[in-house]
Amino acid sequence: MTKHLRWIWRAPWTAALVGITFVAVLAVVADIVVDFAVYQADEHVEDWTPRGELAGDEALLDRAEQVWRDTGVPVGDVEPVYAGRSSSLPVNVLLVALAGQTADDRPVVAFVTSAATAGDPSSDQLFVRALSFPEPYAMAVGFVAARQEPSDSPIPNEGSLAFALSAPGVPTMMLGSDVGGEGLPGEIIWRILPRGAGAWNSGVNTYTDEDSDGRLTRLGAGVRDHAVTAATVSSVGDTITARYDKPAAGDLIVNSSVLVGVVTDASGRVDIAPITQAGQGKVRIRSADVPGVLKAGPSGTLTFTPTAPSELKESDQVLFTTTSGIVVRLGWLSKNFNGEWDVGRGVFLPLSNRPSLAVTP
């Protein structure tokens, strides 16, 4: 394991400086030291004033609340924070966002929606599409649902439905994903993200007058998506361990920039080596969709070799897709002295309780 965990920061900062999409912004924010006195929102999510053109429809809000309560998740009071319809998407939904608490006093937001349709969405059938577990003073809430509901009309190219709502008083935010597509700004954002986008590779950056650099907020996962669990990652020497509820071999550990590695056993031990083994998934360059293979480099780096004609460039992003369809970013290309393409990881050791996500294939 020691060989595979001395990763090198090579290209992320270059990509962040020249990139025009949200994913570049995401990479920069990942290692900014956040001043919470500056970033902190004024209210808890359950205290936000309800927004949306349907926020005054009490009958709709009551029905949406009952749909959520029927799942057994919320305990105590439930407060609406948004009710409205999407528009100008290939398929559209009606949505009610509700804030509450779980039985263990954890803040939770439910996104209750209608079926997605190419016509006008109807409130006849409502269901919980996604859940999010925000910070107490969240700057934004939202979700990315990678898998559709059976009652949905097909989303073109099997894209992912995404929604984000900024905290009151936050002038703008930008939503984007590692898998592609330009970041989209706004206070309320509806979007169809490319296939493969999910809570594990997407997020929003919120911006205020005091904070032009922005703050990253992860989005909730669709209830039909791969399980996403908050985790912390630490290292002792070259051994990395992820701590979260019920670690299992094959789980992916991602931070706000890249795949940290793959869990190898129930102790939460993390290694990058499994993705270089045959049958684990496919690797490609995002910008040109060039396939390739990975191997472990001499200093524990990953090396990418294209398997199709290509013109690769420094700082091209490298994506890995598991056999179960989870797409994660590995890093950025950087040519080494031998003329090979290293994958710059941007993961520094030692790590101490670094916030991350565990994604279960």
Image (spheres, rainbow, N blue to C red):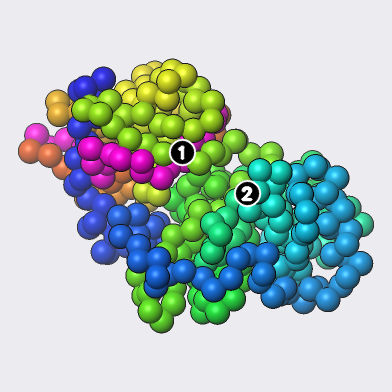
- Amino acid type of the residue that numbered disc 2 sits on in the rendered structure: Arg
Residue at coordinates 33% horizontally, 35% vertically from top-left? Answer: 234
Quarter occupied by residue 279 = top left
Query: Which residue is at the front of the view, 304 or 132?
Result: 132
Expressed as whole percent of the image width and height from the top left, the position of residue 95 reads 76, 61
Query: Which residue is at the front of the view, 224 or 14?
Result: 224
Expressed as whole percent of the image width and height from the top left, the position of residue 347 reads 27, 41
State whether residue 52 appears in this view: yes
| Pointer 2 residue | 106
Q: Distance between the residues labelled 1 and 2?
A: 16 Å
| Left or right position of 284 against 70 | left
Q: Tell me if residue 357 comes above or below residue 44 in the rendering.
A: above
Expressed as whole percent of the image width and height from the top left, the position of residue 328 reads 44, 40
Quarter occupied by residue 79 = bottom right
| Pointer 1 residue | 231
- Location of the N terminus (image quadrant): top left
Please check the rendered image and state whether residue 350 is part of the magenta-colored stretch, yes or no.
Answer: yes
Query: Which residue is at the front of the view, 151 or 127?
Result: 127
Give the farthest residue toward the left: 337
Circle 2 sits in a helix, a strand or a loop, which is it? loop
Span colored in magenta: 338-361
Q: Tell me if residue 262 comes above or below residue 203 in the rendering.
A: above
- Amino acid type of the residue that numbered disc 1 sits on in the rendered structure: Ala
- Location of the C terminus (image quadrant): top right
